[in-house]
Image (cartoon, rainbow, N blue to C red):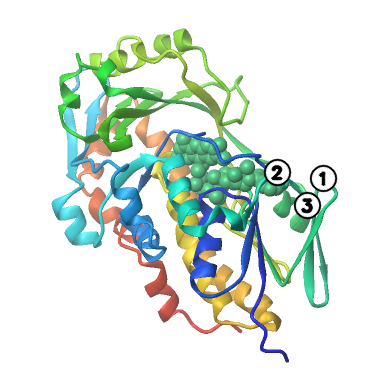
């Protein structure tokens, strides 16, 4: 048995891939990210980072760099779609931070990606590297790329998103599950929304109505509002972060809603639109020296706001486990990672599916009962936001 430390190749330079490479290098493990894009551009709108994801970012040493670009909503405010009646509110600063031990942030996806990249060092990211195949030998793994190049490693992490090529190579093709809904999203500069008095305060807004819902929060140091508008549409199946939707269709879908919603939509000329898919939970994430992380492992609908948070939790756990083994022990470390992470992410995938329906109930007794349930949200979500991934790792049984 050698005592050589593992050399790790990460496929995908999204939040999950950059975070695991950074975590590994901080533990003294050589890791390189292979990213298909030729540059890491400012694609994607806002994401919410809960206390659980914040703890992982803190462990990775990037919270200071991100503080300036993150917004801190003071509360989550559930509103009636038409009247604007505040149905339920929950604090997201004081008591949230006291209870869950870290802040709740809303921030641009690209800002998180750039902060991780800056801390990792761009020299550890190979751009323009589209992975097409993964092969395993008795004592290593080989990645093959579209440009004909190859890379060897002791361990491979497939952090290549919802359409993961690594997952496809390990486990064959799988069907994405279409939710029958689309998400429109965009960033609207706040100075275009001067007539929306509610925006004087940083708030996470959730406007719930029959068959659709509208979520909005500040990002970019509070200078822009990010929104996600979810509508039913079985005919739109394009799953892309860069496709534009029709602003007229979007406005028509929210016709009759409260002026907050219609004003924001009226100020947005180029909404992105993507059909919302997830995957059934994978029965296993790893084979030999290769594993999956983030959306590649557990693609989820956005209705818990946990996609990036779970990728960050995965990353800090996997980095610790690989740092605790030598090159021969990689497969055991990957089994331990999967055993700890899979049950949790599976539950969050299921909860994300369930939330969609309950956010879109018609006015009436069911919606009233939902509102009653929402008053208990901090307790109901404590297992997600109060979670400390590294503390869970410390108390997990040793891998077999
Ligand atoms: P991703 O963020 O999907 O990153 C995967 C990375 O792998 C990408 O950089 C991709 O280019 C790369 N990749 C894919 N295939 C290959 C391959 N074969 N070889 C090499 N590299 C490959 N979530 C939100 O909540 N709001 C948003 O606005 C939002 N915008 C997004 C925009 C984009 C362009 C993307 C890719 C994702 C977006 N997400 C958004 C999703 C969110 O970022 C993820 O759910 C979460 O961060 C988990 O990240 P991940 O690293 O697992 O996957």
Residue 299, visible in the rendered structure: no
Give me the residue at 35% from left, 64% from top.
387
Numbered tag placed on residue 383 in the rendering: none
Residue 57 x/y as whole percent: 39, 58
In the picture, measured across the screen, residue 111 lies left or right of residue 337, that is left
Residue 392 x/y as whole percent: 40, 73
Of marks 3 and 1, which one's residue comes earlier in the chain? 1
Which residue matches tag 1?
A: 147
Mark pair 2, 3: CA separation: 24 Å
Which residue matches tag 2?
A: 128
Near mark 1 (Cα within 10 A), the count class, few <14, some 14-19 or many ≥20, is few
Which residue matches tag 3?
A: 172
The relative height of residue 234 versus residue 344 in the rendered view (above or below) is above
Give me the residue at 21% from left, 47% from top.
92
Distance from mark 1 CB to nearest ligand 1 atom below 8 Å = no
Q: If the picture is divided into quarters, which one holds ligand 1?
A: top right
- Tell whether label 2 touches label 1 (CB within 8 Å): yes
């Amino acid at each position: 048995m050698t005592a050589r430390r593992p050399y790790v190749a990460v496929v995908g330079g999204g939040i999950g891939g950059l975070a695991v490479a950074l975590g590994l290098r901080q533990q003294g493990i050589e890791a390189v990210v292979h990213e298909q894009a030729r540059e890491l551009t400012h694609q994607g709108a806002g994401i919410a980072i809960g206390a659980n994801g914040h703890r992982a970012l803190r462990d990775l040493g990037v919270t200071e760099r991100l503080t300036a670009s993150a917004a801190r909503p003071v509360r989550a405010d559930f509103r009636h779609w038409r009247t604007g009646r505040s149905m339920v509110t929950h604090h997201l600063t004081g008591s949230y931070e006291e209870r869950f031990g870290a802040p709740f942030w809303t921030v641009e996806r690209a800002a998180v990606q750039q902060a991780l990249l800056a801390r990792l060092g761009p020299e550890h990211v190979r751009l323009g590297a589209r992975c097409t195949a993964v092969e395993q030998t008795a004592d290593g793994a080989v990645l093959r790329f579209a440009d004909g190049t190859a890379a060897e490693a002791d361990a491979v992490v497939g952090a290549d998103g919802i359409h993961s090529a690594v997952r496809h190579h390990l486990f064959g093709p799988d069907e994405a599950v279409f939710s029958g809904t689309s998400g429109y999203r965009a960033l609207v500069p706040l100075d275009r929304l001067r007539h929306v008095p509610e925006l004087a305060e940083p708030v996470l807004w959730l406007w719930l109505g029959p068959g659709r819902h509208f979520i909005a929060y500040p990002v970019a140091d509070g200078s822009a509002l990010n929104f996600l508008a979810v509508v039913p549409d079985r005919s739109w199946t394009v799953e892309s972060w860069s496709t534009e939707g029709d602003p007229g269709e979007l406005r028509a879908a929210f016709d009759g809603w409260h002026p907050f919603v219609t004003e924001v939509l009226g100020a947005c000329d180029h909404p992105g639109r993507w059909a919302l898919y997830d995957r059934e939970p994978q029965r296993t994430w790893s084979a030999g020296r290769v594993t999956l992380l983030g959306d590649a492992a557990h693609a989820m609908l956005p209705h818990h706001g946990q996609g990036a948070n779970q990728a960050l939790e995965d990353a800090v756990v996997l980095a610790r486990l690989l740092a605790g083994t030598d090159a021969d022990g990689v497969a055991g470390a990957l089994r331990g990672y999967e055993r700890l992470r899979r049950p949790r992410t599976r539950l969050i995938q299921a909860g994300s599916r369930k939330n969609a329906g309950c956010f879109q109930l018609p006015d009436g007794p069911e919606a009233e009962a939902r509102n009653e349930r929402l008053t208990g949200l901090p307790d109901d979500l404590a297992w997600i936001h109060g979670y400390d991934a590294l503390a869970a790792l410390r108390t997990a049984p040793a891998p077999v």
